[in-house]
Amino acid sequence: MDGFHDLGGFQGFGKVPHTINSLSYKQVFKQDWEHLAYSLMFIGVDHLKKFSVDEVRHAVERLDVRQHVGTQYYERYIIATATLLVETGVITQAELDEALGSHFKLANPAHAGGRQAITGRPPFEVGDRVVVRDEYVAGHIRMPAYVRGKEGVILHRTSEQWPFPDAIGHGDVSAAHQPTYHVEFRVKDLWGDAADDGFVVVDLFESYLDKAPSAKAVNA
Amino acid sequence: MNTDEKTTSTPGERARALFQVLKQKELIPAGYIEQLTQLMAHDWSPENGARVVAKAWVDPQFRELLLKDGTAACAQFGYTGPQGEYIVALEDTPTLKNVIVCSLCSCTNWPVLGLPPEWYKGFEFRARLVREGRTVLRELGTELPEGATIKVWDTSAESRYLVLPVRPEGSEGMDEEALRALITKDVLIGVALPQVA
């Protein structure tokens, strides 16, 4: 889905609040509840096996935009985990509200039911020029919008395969497994002159890609 | 209860409310949160990545393995587990600077780099790095040479990266342990270059 989470290239932000080699990271959890975010998420994913990490990502994406902008990072994972635990029937909204003493606002419902991977095509090879499919998906997808329809070159095909996010992200445990490709794009091809020069490499599932129309293999 | 009322609770109160509901249903195994928190807050650390890079600087065979199969190379140190299942090392050269980001959220090589820091997960870095790499690095305090190319790696699927920087000038006489001290979390992410003091 084209949501606020998909921030690559989004303009209007100021400086990154960091100076190199500051040691602020050494206190990993700054507030006494932050460790609960991933812990409770993994209780849902690994211990109860009620949902996948991909569904958690999608639940974060489903946060209402106005809410999303104002949340802290770990807070989003608390809300996403709570949302999925309610949606899978482990707990109820009423139980959350009662424990909180006020309304516990969850993420918005999914807008789509997910989709299947494209299968049966030959894999792409290192050096192939590929184009990212010009698709608009209402559900979960792990293709940053800034590469949609853009052409790049394959640097690497993973030796492992993973369930297609657009399916497993909606709870489809029969999702086809696919390799991903490290696809290199020229920054100028993404944003023209309104960008610094250089390259961006995006890790893209096979189903997000087609061979480029003028598909000449490039020697790496 | 009036569900139309404005949410007035704090993030911490909501986290504890969710914890409370799960605890009342006895769905939280004994020690589960404590064990995971130990991993997240202590065991997964950039000191792990520093060991990997320092070894690659002094041991050509290990360097070759790291670049060919980062997962196997890091597993030699025991750096495996969640978010470390497919590790790829990105080799800098004098004219190429690799930098890691996750524009969609926060995916990071947990066992080798540690959990991502706040600024890495923040909206500014995620939005700007892919588009204004050189500018963002300059603002953070890293000025790259004129001819150097920046390559930003967006962690948008299951590959988990670490940057293998160029061994800096002045480090020739240093042993592996001394080299480790040059390799910070920011060096492993790629926003900083290793510096000999």
Image: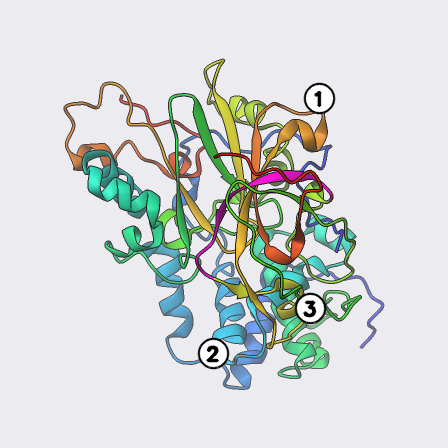
Mark 2 or mark 3, earlier in chain? 2
B60 sits left or right of A75 in the view? left
Q: Is residue A215 magenta?
A: no
Q: Check disc 1 and give the amino acid type.
A: Asp
Q: Which dot, 2 or 3, sits closer to the camera? A: 3
Quarter where residue B12 is shown: bottom right
Q: Are marks 1 and 3 on the same chain?
A: yes
Q: Which residue is drawn at 69% across and 77% down?
A: A87
A82 sits left or right of A134 in the view? left
Q: Residue A116 carries which label?
A: 3
Comparing A81 with B52, the one in front is B52
Q: Distance between the residues labelled 2 and 1?
A: 49 Å
* Any part of residue A99 in sight: no
SS for tag 2?
helix
Q: In this view, does B144 lie above or below B32?
A: above
Q: What residue span does the magenta drawing correspond to?
A: A149-160
Q: Do labels 2 and 1 share a chain?
A: yes
Mark 1 or mark 3, earlier in chain? 3
Pointer 2 residue: A47
Pointer 1 residue: A193
Q: Which dot, 1 or 3, sits closer to the camera? A: 3
Q: Check disc 3 and give the amino acid type.
A: Gln
Q: Check disc 2 and give the amino acid type.
A: His
Mark 2, other Cα within 10 Å: few <14 / some 14–19 / many ≥20: some
Q: Where is residue A67 in the image (x, y as percent from the top left)?
A: 74, 55
A125 sits left or right of A27 in the view? right
Quarter where residue B81 is shown: bottom left
